Amino acid sequence: MNLEFDKPITRTSPVHAPSSTAGQKPRVLQVGKFYPPHMGGIETHLQALCGVLRGEVDLRVIVSSDDNRTVEHTLDGVPVHRIATLLTAFSTPICPAMVARIRASHADLVHIHLPNPTAVLAYLASGHRGGVVITYHSDTVRQKVMGRLFEPLLQAILRRSSAIIATSPNYLETSTALQPHRDRCHVIPYGIDVAQFQQRDPAAVDRIRRQYGDRLIISVGRLVYYKGFEYVIRAMTQVRGKLLLIGDGPLRGELGNLASQLGVADRVIFAGEIQNSGVAPYYHAADVFALPSVARSEAFGIVQIEAMAAGLPVVNTSLDSGVPFVSLHEKTGLTVPPSDPKQLASAINRLLDNPILRKSYGEAARLRASKEFGVTLMASRTMSLYRGLLT
């Protein structure tokens, strides 16, 4: 197991000789579930990674389409093939044509982002004989039946892999699926364009502050169960301030009703979905960032890096995942037990009431984001892995 984030990685599984000829860039096929503008943490990661790797390798991306049409286009210089979805089962798009696309790619390396049963089935059926790299983003947590059905296929692709990327040492240590394959596991944390969130737009920040006032807490993410937004709403009964929730999802109505029942609807604002390019001023206008996640489906919490890059202290939860690895307790913010609105409120109040502590944690957060979670560093670590496998 390699925990030396920034050192070249030694090959641990055999890789067939590259099909690229001398002088040509290696052909790398990225296989994901979806790709932006489809919103999501893995999708954002894949786009950021490809944005840098496209200058280093001959890159293609294969993902599922949102409907029954196959669409091929180039997005920000990255060729993206969105394969027609025949149907969706257990939140998994079924795309039979993906098998032939992988087979026809003649890629030196296929890089698959899991969990994604469709990609695993397609890859195993494709007969591809080059190297395969797995980024293991998360266990299958809530869909227990699907997880049990998928386990044999998951273990098959992990055994077939040349290397496995875990996004934090915490997740690697706590994922039972990865334990039989630790000799091929390498930790490469997520990275973002830190500068995008460090740049301040004073006019936009002033507008947001005039609209919402001071003592502003911000949370960002899809309104789904594992984000734990109900607990930060419950915490608001004990917090003097306003909560701004950025994102949308199936729990929007339920969370709105909860805020009304608790008498905090006037201090809980649902801002809806805001594209990544427009969210930075909200971070700069806020005083505290809260990530109240309650399940290890929240494997990392990339939004923490965004908030940290903007200089915000973070209140997160002590999940057995990468969440507390990103923002460190009593260094870049505060970590509290999951599903505990009382302690969540106490941590938020502590930061809101102490501007010196808030500034200290915020500055440390900005430094940690720049040093550890930049997209260029993430891509260079990934390229080091690729080179080790291909040479």
Image (tube, helix red, strand yellow):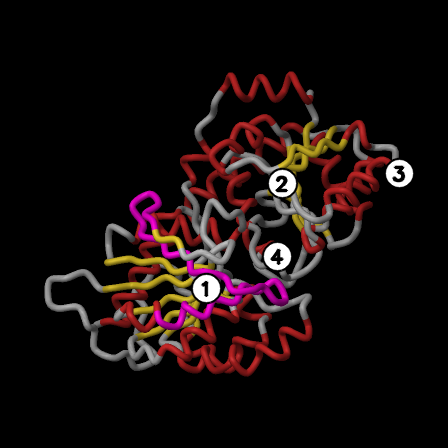
Marker count (numbered) = 4
Compute the Cα span from label 3 to label 1: 40 Å
Question: Image check: 46 left or right of 210?
Answer: left
Q: Are marks 4 and 2 in contact (CB under 8 Å)?
A: no
Which of the two labelled residues, at mark 4 and mark 3, occupies the earlier sequence position? 3
Residue 391: image x %, image y %? 21, 72
Which corner quadrant of the image does residue 234 belong to?
Answer: top right
Residue under numbered circle 4: 298
Residue type, mark 1 in image: His
Residue under numbered circle 2: 247
Badge 2 density bin: few <14, some 14–19, many ≥20, Cα 10 Å: some
Which corner quadrant of the image does residue 352 belong to?
Answer: top right
In the displayed structure, 334 sits above or below 2; it is above
Give the residues in magenta.
Answer: 73-100
Eye-nearest disc, 4 or 3: 3
In the displayed structure, 114 sits above or below 205; it is below
Query: At numbered mark 1, what does the secondary structure look like: helix, strand or loop?
Result: strand
Residue 145: image x %, image y %? 68, 75
Point 50% across, 19% down: residue: 202
Residue under numbered circle 1: 113
Quadrant containing the N terminus is bottom left
In the displayed structure, 105 sits above or below 250; it is below
Eye-nearest disc, 1 or 4: 1
Residue type, mark 4 in image: Glu
